[in-house]
Image (cartoon, coloured by chain):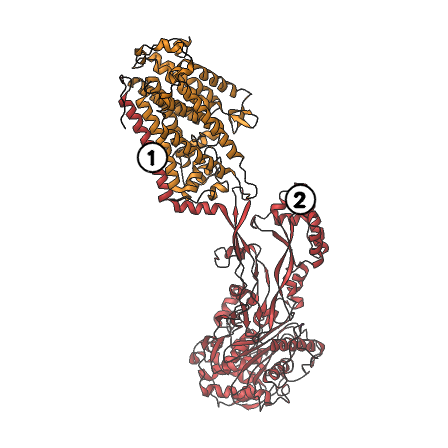
Chain colours: A orange, B red
Amino acid sequence: MADAWGLGRAPHRGPSVAGRGDRGRRRLEPVFRTRAPAAWKHVDLVLVLCVAAVSVLGALMVLSSTRGTNPDAYDTSFLRKQVLFIAVGVVGMVLVTLVDYRHLRDVAWVPYVVTTLLLALVVSPLGSERRGTQAWFQLGGFQLQPAELAKVSAVLAVATVLARSEVPLRARRLAVALVVLGLPVALIMLQPDLGTALVFLAIATGTLLVGGARARHLVLLTAVGVIGMVGVVNSDVLEDYQRDRLTNFLADDDADVQASAYNSDQSKAAIASGSINGKGLFEGTQTRLGFVPEQHTDFIFTAVGEELGFVGSATVLGLLALICVRTWRTAQIAGDRLGMLICIGVLSMLVFEIFQNVGMTMGIMPITGIPLPFMSYGGSSIIASWLAIGLVLNVHMRRFG
Amino acid sequence: MSMPVPEDRRHVPRLRLSVLAVVAAALFAALFARLYDLQVVGSDRYQVQAEANRVRTVQIPAPRGRILDRKGAVLVDNRVAVVVAVDRSVLGDLPRRRQLEVLGRLAADLTSAGHATDAGALGERLGDDRYSRYAPVPVAADVPEDLKIYLEEHADDYPGVVVERAALRSYPHGPLAVHILGYVGKINEQELAERRREVAKPYTLNDEIGKTGVEQTFEPYLRGTPGVRRIEVDAQGDPVRVIDERPPRPGDDLVLSIDAQVQALAEQKVQQALAEARARPNRDGSRNAGTTGAAVVLDPSSGQLLALASTPSYDPELAVDGFDQAEWARLNDPANGTPLNNWAIQGQWAPGSTYKPFVGYAALMSGVMAPDTEFVDRGGYQIPGCTGAKCYRRNAGGSAYGTVTIPRALTVSSDAYFYHVGAEFWLQRDRFGGDDAMQRHLVPWGLGDRTGVALTSEATGRVPTAAWKRDYCNRVDCGDPDWRTGDNVNMAIGQGDVLVTPLQLANAYATFANGGTRYVPQVALRTQRYQSAKVTEQLAPQVAGRVPLPPNVRQPLLDGLAGVPRDGTASRAFAGFPLDRFPVAAKTGTAQVDGRSDTAVFAAFGPVTAPRYSVAVVLEESGFGGTAAAPVARALLEGLAGITPLRPVGPDGLPVGPAQPVGTTPGGGYD
């Protein structure tokens, strides 16, 4: 059963890299033996530095948007937690790079099953709800948002499935890949969290495209997808506030400052009022005085825009683009299809998240609650993003292996 | 960078990777484009929005300018008063029950301190969202010092209650010139709405505004420029810090043309004359009501007012904290003479014989009479072509003056002469210029129209015409809508439907005195900065019109008026007055009103050769002009001419020292 899904321990039947004939030997060796010193020479330093830079800037912006207005008692608790999250993310990234990604394929089902189970549990009474979305577990002072981690484990899982399939994909393998991605999406829509579900759609699009799906299948899936989206918007699957946000976006009217458009309006005002040079770190009035709701999480880019201006926000956007470029480049030069598809999964995830999140803050995308990778406050998102970068680094440093 | 190519690259779908790259690049390009659009192209509008989000402004009230008399005596000053206010942001944080309890106690304290209120009224005031959220709402002004101390000492028991200081109006001379000064009060809805666009000195619901008098007409000068405190607020609207503050600037002082000493004398003499009129029975035994009176002094060479007295008066202190209802009712009650009215400009009376110089002017100008035309006054006048009891008009008092020309007719106030003039004007209207031939020569004197003085509620007076009567009788049932000879006859002696205000009368005499230049009576000379006294606006005399006054017309009229105090109807009132040193031209008037005692009227100017003062006195229900009103004018002229030195003004608004009786006398003659 598991074999049929391409997730099991069964010897893979991949057509390409198997040719070297060293498969059997390696499987007998301890996992950590792959930590060959040679691999470290090929670490993508540009990628690591970009991610680090964006994360540090993000942490600063989290501080700026959460420290409050009392100079005698600035609130640094969000900053300290964010730094902790980044530290955990860095450790996670390092751990992910220690294991040769080619070995990960054999254990890819483990994180997938774990996160899928967590997604099932989070919509049970064990999960916590806020503003109509039941998306996380409350663990002491921290929240665990399984959907964030599920994105990474799903990338790994679908890459594993597709890497084992013949190109072009037969309908049955395509269906397996769709089920692997569809299961978490279905659970996420139960929360419901439209934004994160759309991230999975992006992952599916990227990996199926590069993973060798037939053109006619892609066309068919696109058609079904479009019809499905229209159906979802017009059905009662969406909560009212989600539909409101979507329709608000569609009927965007600058003059009409309705309460429901308040988010978008204040967000745009924050970014645009930053002008070219910005108002200076900690000097943004929209940021300092809390005019942008959810600023430290989903709307963190508005703090960049207001305080660092076009110069700063274009730099941040440039760094994010560079991260995507390096990920794409890694996909191109990956040693095998698995590596390539992992990178493509991560790339699709990042590009969609960045475009959707930054686009939302600037009023060209609807408001859906997905975080900006590496910058938005939140442990699950930060850690998941760093883990994803760990996967890309892993593929990059072992491209000759 | 040399890129080692793996042996087997068949797994790399180059085209599809490129498609993905292009899509990603396009999405990033869209983000960059939008970023540029927002931050570089469209930033300005959003900067305004962001600024509007965070900045709230609070106005800091500025003291009003003072009001001074022409010599610098302070008539209206400011004093510092204690104001109790409630900071809603503090009170609002309390539980509802505690809020009501605090307001209840505050209301009780205020009530026992003389500011009657209750918790409901306070709550309603605090609930008015037009008050700025960032400044305490005042609930009582001018509370006693001991309540202030009590509230400060028990601040913990009165959360949100703050005690502030504010500038209130004070009146060093009490009721002196109150009708000129007017009063200030809380701005009302309509006034606020009318001034919504005011930019330089914007109004808020808390502000005071001039309601009457020069407080109203010079409001733009007197009002200070409010200070502005800019407060930064957060998204909840809670204040975070004060960004900056522009201090308030006091309004400009207003220097009146009024001379406080002359004004005090005028007010005192009018009051005395009315009191004497009330005390003295008339010849027929009837009593004078002596209710209201007014006296006006102005400078004919410029139109500047030196005094404008109206009686009864009231204490402007009553207005400081707002009139209470009983006071308001009393001050508006006609039975009390409506003390709030400025009778000098709002009162309209028939001028009686003081009208005759202008009728005489009309007669000479249109050729009804020549200066040397002789008329035999037999003590009465039979209206030509008229049959019935009312067609024979007797002179007032019944005297016959024999053969008179116009100077003598004025001096002795021959009714018959002017009856004849009025009748001729109507009967020979085809020859003299139509229905309004007489009226056309009265209007240029400013009769029947507002003088335009910068005071509130000025009345127009009335110069009746045939057209007016027809129109009036269409609206009000007045019997005969047609203008008759009798109407012109009545009008010619300042009776019938003729109405003037005391100010109009004084200004018409001033116009005659200066040779025909009619000024807009001027109540203020200039505005100046509060401390430096730097003049900010010099108010020049303003000419309203010119009356053609050829010497051959003016001289006989002047001769007639100059005779009045010498050997005419005011000779008794002016007995002992040094007319050789200070020659006075004058005219008495006694207007009969059905069912009431006579209105005493007197108008004068002097010195005749180079007139510096024009005076008008009107005393309602007080008897004869020559005996009741003329002594008031005489007392004023004595003061103005330096015959009886003017005395300083006391805190009660009256000249210090014992008041000499006006010396109004019973009897005398009709005029």
Between B414 and A222, the residue placed more toward the observer is A222
On-image quarter of the C terminus of chain B: bottom right
Q: At which x and y percent is residue A28?
A: 40, 9
SS at mark 1 in the image: helix
Say if residue A204 shows up in the picture: no
Q: Which residues are magenta?
A: B648-657
Q: At which x and y percent is residue B166?
A: 61, 59
The residue at which mark 2 appears reads as B99
Decide whether the magenta segment is chiefly helix, strand or loop: loop
- Disc 1 chain ID: B
Q: Is residue B393 magenta?
A: no
Q: Nearer the viewer, mark 1 or mark 2?
A: 1
Say if residue A278 shows up in the picture: yes
The residue at which mark 1 appears reads as B30
Q: Amino acid at mark 1?
A: Ala
On-image quarter of the N terminus of chain B: top left
Q: Amino acid at mark 2?
A: Gln
Between B33 and A374, the residue placed more toward the observer is A374
| Rendered image quadrant of residue A210 | top left
Residue at 64%, 89% in the rendered image: B576
Marks 1 and 2 sit apart, C-alpha to C-alpha, by 55 Å
Q: At which x and y percent is residue B312?
A: 65, 70
SS at mark 2 in the image: helix
